[in-house]
Amino acid sequence: MTIKLGVPSKGRLMEKTFEWFAAKGVTLRQTGAEREYAGTVDGIEGIDLVLLSASEIPRELAAGRIHLGVTGSDLVRDKLAQWDNQVAELAQMGFGHADLIIAVPKAWTDVDTLDDLDAAAAAFRARHGFRLRIATKYHHLVREFLKANGVADYQLVDSQGATEGTVKNLTAEAVADITSTGDTLRANHLKVLTAEPIHRSQATLFKSRTAPWTDETRATFVTLKSMLEIE
Amino acid sequence: MRATSLEKLGDRKLAEQFCAAFAAEGAERFEASILQPADVLLDLYGEDIRARAFITHDPVEGEMMLRPDFTVPVVLTHMQGDGAPASYTYSGEVFRKQDDHPDRPSEFFQVGFERFGGDDPAKADAEVFALFSKQLAPYDLRAATGDIGILVAAVRGLRTTQRRRAALLRHIWRPRRFRALMNRFSQAGTALRQQNLERVRGNLALPAAPFIGFRTQSEIDARIAALEEDAAEPAISTGEIELLDDILSLRETVPNVLSALRDIAVDMPSIAEAVTRLNARADALDHAGIDIDTLDFETAFGRTSMEYYDGFVFGFFADTRPDLPPVATGGRYDALTTVLGQGRGVPAVGGVLRPALLRQLGGSAL
């Protein structure tokens, strides 16, 4: 039995993950052609590298098909019900920082806070006959956040990309999205509400609570943890 | 947690027994499709329902929901009829996502009794409660009652602006936000209200940003005018805030609550009518054979559940199993019939019970 380690299959998140492990003596490598999703692990025996889309890693961890996985903490919290019963955080990796925030048109001079948003939503619904629309792909996190803060009369509309453009395109009145610098928001004439972010995300190494373990994989895991200086 | 085949068979049988008992009291049988159009429910409950109901897509009908309750379909059906007073009973599965309680089942039988029309609401409230009480008498349950109407009357009578009263009424079902609003409108919130206005005035001094989206300048102007009004308006008096707090913290037997509310009504006459209604209901309950001297009443009861109850509310709980949801819940929802009846409303009171919970409490009756 080997430990299956799921890692994002492309882009900066993959490169940064490789660097993070390499700095601790665990070398992750893509094998074969550049676009082939196969890889190996050097520096420790008994670990298989599984290259996956970052957005599929939460589901694979929860299903126990991989033992360990690297993905954004935002994705785990949004996609897994009661996430901490299904996975455990082993290490925050210090890159891939992004905040999940709510943004509204900068022209809304009367809205800076969640209180303002709630009041604006009530008046908007009375005026337009439908609930104020917030475009997002983080449905669970945003809904829980707004519920906890007592915001009413809004609805979430799904947006899987180019979310910042939805207000200009009249498919939403506000957005809830990940931002690291805020540049895209500003370019689209949006401003971030002054509330604490819904979630401060970063790349995180997770351990599945449902994957099967044997004496052999447990021993490998102990070695890996000491190399990664976890605990 | 999923019920086994045997358990489901048992639940169905028990549900049918309750349904037959309700029918014996003169209720018509009611049936509703399992796939319900999502738009009515979404408009009514907002985003909260998405977290609780299973949503699916029909190629022709569009977004559909697996029936999260029977209340909306039964109200819609009744309101489309001739409007004559009627009672209905139903039995069937309802479906709820349990993200926060994975140990609870996501489908279970629900049996309901709903009564529409009539000109004696106190009597109707009492009869529906007595009906559930009688059906559940063999089980060891504690009943709790409340009345959202008391809090609503208190808020409507506050000596402050219409806008503040409307803001508080809108958040009656969200206790945390309600509390925050109470603070903002009180003496303690005077500085906060001034800050809010100054912050917005500061924004107005910034270079204008291009206007995008549906929300218009006139809506923004209206909100700024509201903030100005709110900052200039005196706070809700400390006396009134304390009375609201007193009302919200009442948790006693029905006679003791009545006596406390009569005292409060001396300083807050706006609740007098609601207290009279509560008194009439207590008399009707007594007349229906309920021991009101031991019946619990909480003014805050029912505030965190679905926001369609607007008067009498009740629940039956198993004190031995605090982990379980209430076995039965119900109440008055006149306002919902107005919303679903396109402005034409009728008095409505009803309740539901869950046979699977009675099974978990020990299966058969005591």
Image: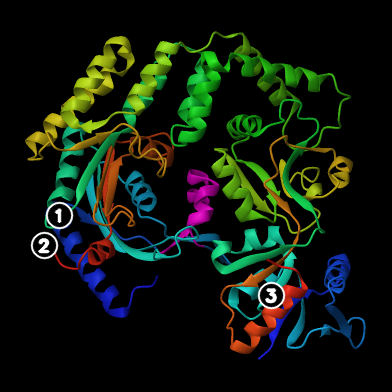
What residue is rendered at 55% in x and 48% in y? B47
In the rendered structure, the answer to whether residue A52 lies left or right of residue B165 reads: right
CB atoms of marks 1 and 3 within 8 Å: no
> Residue A88, position in %: x, y?
62, 66
The quadrant where residue B144 appears:
top left
Residue at which label 1 appears? B135
> Residue B149, position in %: x, y?
32, 28
Q: Nearer the viewer, mark 1 or mark 3?
A: 3
Crowd rating for badge 1 (residues with CA inside 10 Å; few <14, some 14–19, many 20+): some
> Residue B341, position in %: x, y?
40, 40
> Residue A66, position in %: x, y?
66, 79
Q: Chain of mark 2?
A: B
Quarter of the image where the N terminus of chain B is located: bottom left
Residue type at mark 3 is Leu
What residue is rendered at 20% in x and 60% in y? B19
Q: Magenta stretch mostly in which secondary structure? A: helix
As helix, strand or loop, the secondary structure at mark 1 comes to helix
Q: Nearer the viewer, mark 2 or mark 1?
A: 2
The reply to whether label 1 and label 3 mark residues of one chain is: no
**Between B10 and B111, the one nearer to me in the picture:** B10
Establish if B141 lies above or below A111: below
What residue is rendered at 7% in x and 40% in y? B289
**Between B273 and A4, the one nearer to me in the picture:** A4
Residue at which label 3 appears? A68
Q: What is the span of residues highlighted in magenta in the rendered image?
A: B34-54
Q: Nearer the viewer, mark 3 or mark 2?
A: 3
Q: Chain of mark 3?
A: A
Residue type at mark 1 is Gln
**A229 in the magenta segment:** no
Residue at which label 2 appears? B366
